[in-house]
Image (cartoon, rainbow, N blue to C red):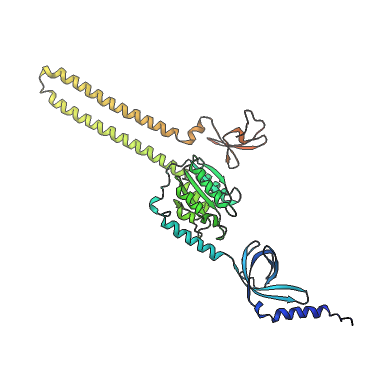
Amino acid sequence: MEEKPITVSQLSMYIKQIFDAEEMLYNIKVLGEISGLSIVRGVAYFTLKDENATLSCVCFDTSNFLYSNGESVIVTGTPRYYVKGGKLNFNVVKIAKYGMGELYQKFLELKNKLGKKGYFDKGRKKILPSNIKRIGVVTSKEGAVIQDIINVGTRRNPFIDIVLYPVKVQGVNAENEIAKGISFFDNYNVDVIIVARGGGSLEDLQPFNTEIVADAVYNCQKFIVSAVGHETDFTICDFCSDLRAPTPSAGAELVFSNIKDYILNFKQCIAKLKQSIKGVYIDKQQNFIDVCKDFYKNYKNINIRYQNRFNNTLIKFMHAIKTFAEAKQHKFEMLSSMLKKLNPKEVLKLGYASVKKGNEKILSIKNIKPNDNLQLTFIDGEAIVEVLKIKGEKSGI
């Protein structure tokens, strides 16, 4: 006898009853990676997947849903079979990032280990150099971080060079690249090193919480500023560095001296030098007058046979005073000349000009090409010119 078929509705209801009746499936936790996330009318739809399988999920409460594709999460909920759509969904009632507790625990363990080894001791931290001419930056060549550092540095002091060592700041092998960048600048002609990246989660900042980066910072002989994350983010790199900056921009503010301070200090030095020389001259002049008066008082009582000796002595004394004054005047003129040469504007007065293309300083024809627009800064103004032709050797750098 032929078996009577059942309807789709009957089979679907039967499957639903099986899932509804299975208490072991209520409020279970499932680990996976979010994929295909979309939020429609306050409801989140996504797929939870691992290497071998996928699970359709729906979350009706998205008021605190701060997750994105690619994140590993643990979801709590119950699988539901929807008869009308013939589809199995996992109804999510709770979601949490996976590994946050584990990563934080590793962070604390490494911090405790390095603290005991003296990596964070204040006594070993170096002093920020006073005359910074070149700064090395270890960060990604993409994104806003390097641009922020360039903008702040150029605004505060355009005469300080910036050298970039591009690295990955998150993901596989990022910590090795960061450590190599620090080691590179330790043997390169820079005065200060800035290690920087923008804010992110604990997972994003993980490369800066590794022992290989901590070792590179600890063993570096150059002054290191750690400008990693936002103001509330703290990393192992921060604790090992000589100076921690709350943001990359703040790091640039700390190490780029303000050119206005140099100009003010220059003027103050000139004023002090003039005052010092004037004081010495007046003091010696008064001493000379006093000595002359004493000699004159005693001159009348000196026997005639000592008169010639007295005259010779007086002439030598006056010559010595004159020589001393001339030496001080010459030294003053030399110092004034040296200080004048240090003024960047004096170079422009000689007919030279500062050449820039956008925010880039142009030091060689290797950095320009025909049709480029260049900004020329003269002593009395600026001009925009177009490159028509380039003469000279343009071999590779």
Of 67 and 73, nearer the camera is 73
Height in image: 295 above or below 171? above
Number of numbered labels in the structure image: 0
Q: Is residue 277 left or right of residue 287?
A: right
The location of residue 291, given as percent across then percent down, is 19, 29
Q: Quadrant of the N terminus?
A: bottom right
Residue 295 occupies which quadrant of the picture? top left
Of 384 and 42, nearer the camera is 42
Residue, far right:
1
Task: Tell me, yes or no, if residue 280 can be seen here.
Answer: yes
Residue 278 occupies which quadrant of the picture? top left
Height in image: 7 above or below 53? below
Of 86 and 194, nearer the camera is 86
The location of residue 375, given as percent across then percent down, is 60, 38
The location of residue 51, given as percent across then percent down, is 68, 62
Task: Tell me, yes or no, if residue 250 can be seen here.
Answer: no
Residue found at x 77% / y 80%: 14
Q: Quadrant of the C terminus?
A: top right
The location of residue 198, given as percent across then percent down, is 56, 55
Residue found at x 16% / y 19%: 309
Q: Is residue 73 left or right of residue 116?
A: right
Height in image: 248 above or below 317? below
Residue found at x 12% / y 23%: 300
Residue found at x 14% / y 27%: 297
